[in-house]
Each structure stands twice: as C-alpha cells, then as structure tokens.
Amino acid sequence: MNFDFLEIVGRSVVVYLFIVIAIRIAGKKELAQLSVIDLVFILLISNAVQNAMVGSDSSLVGGIVAAATLFIVNIILKFVTFKFKKANALLEGEPVLLIHNGKLVEKNLQKEKIPVDEIEAAVREHGVDKIKDVNLAVLEIDGNISIISDNFTKKSTRRRKAHRIIQKND
C-alpha cells in the first residue's frame, strides 16, 4: 500500500486552521450557545472536510494520521495561545463589555450581534431583575455572559458551582 502521509498531515493542518478561523469569524457567542442547528452544522462540517483531509486514502492508518495531526496541531495552538498573549487575543478573542453601570453598550451588542432580549435573559438567569441593576456584563471569550451586580436575587455563578463540586470531592 502506498500512503502519502505527508499529504494527509498537510491537508489536516490546513483544514484545522480553516475551521479555527471560520469559527473565530462566526463569533464567540456561538460557542456557548450551541443549538440543534449549530450541532447539525458542526457534524456536517466534520463530514464535509473529512475527504479534504485524507483525500482518496480511506484506510484506518490514513484516518489515524489525520486524527493524530489534528491532536498535535491543537496542542501546538494551545501552547502558543498560552505563551503569547497576542496570539491568544487573535485566535480566542477578548472579552467584550455589554453592560456598564446599568447601561447597554450598544456598539458592542451590534458588533457581537446580540439582541437586547438575549441580554435580558442572561441578566435574569444570573438572578438580577433589570439591566439597570447590572454593574457589569461581559461576553467572555468562551461565549458565556458574566454578570456582576450588587442586586443579585440569587447567586448562581459557575465559580460557586465549581466550589461546591470541589467540596464534595474533598
């Protein structure tokens, strides 16, 4: 059997980088709010790019070479984004201020394509009644919206949940 592993490696790297850039362009909001449509889209994308990575080689070894390449490129990108702040900002983006002292930051909402009703829902999910009661709302790089307020009616942040999980395991 004649396998062109270097071609599979090269194709896999190109496809990986394309998908990273495409997801980055699509916006961070999409990451944390994966809907059924988004899930189907991701599954179809993975199927669509499979042949682009392995070409005509549909062997087990060809698939393993492509998968191993994706793992290696992923590890390299994680290392680069950890070591170099500019690379991290370029690939991951930066947090975006959505509410400041009870006022919506309209230009950032428009830039991130976040409707007001979605912000209102996030505020309520964090136990705050109204936008005007929010000190700070930030769209994090992972797509989640963090809310800081002096007027929490309930405290349910990821940090508190993680703290409870840690206590259970001790």
Image (spheres, rainbow, N blue to C red):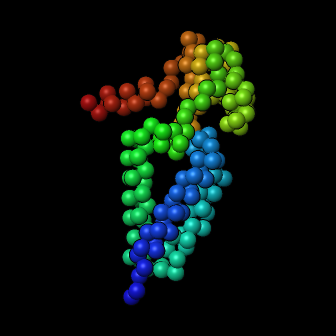
Going by the picture, which residue comes out furthest to the bottom? 1
Expressed as whole percent of the image width and height from the top left, the position of residue 155 reads 51, 20
Residue 167 image point, x, y percent: 32, 27
Q: Which residue sits at x=63%, y=47%?
A: 25
Residue at the (50%, 69%) spot, across then down: 11
Please tell me which residue lies in front, 131 or 63: 63
Percent across and percent down for residue 29 are 62, 40
Image quarter (top left, top right, bottom left or bottom right) of the C terminus: top left
Whether residue 123 is situated above or below residue 114 in the rendered picture = above
For the N terminus, give its image quadrant.
bottom left
The residue at the far left in this view is 170
Residue at 52%, 57% in the rendered image:
17
Q: Residue at x 60, y 24 (%)?
A: 137
Question: Which of the 4 image quarters holds residue 50?
Answer: bottom right
In the image: residue 117, left or right of residue 70 = right
Residue 142 appears in the picture as rendered: no
Q: Nearer the viewer, residue 46 or 18?
A: 18
Taking 56 as reference, is 71 above or below it? above
Query: Who is closer to the viewer here, 88 or 99?
Result: 88
Q: Is residue 155 visible?
A: yes
Count the labels in the image. 0
On screen, residue 125 above or below 35 = above
- x then y, percent, for residue 10: 47, 68
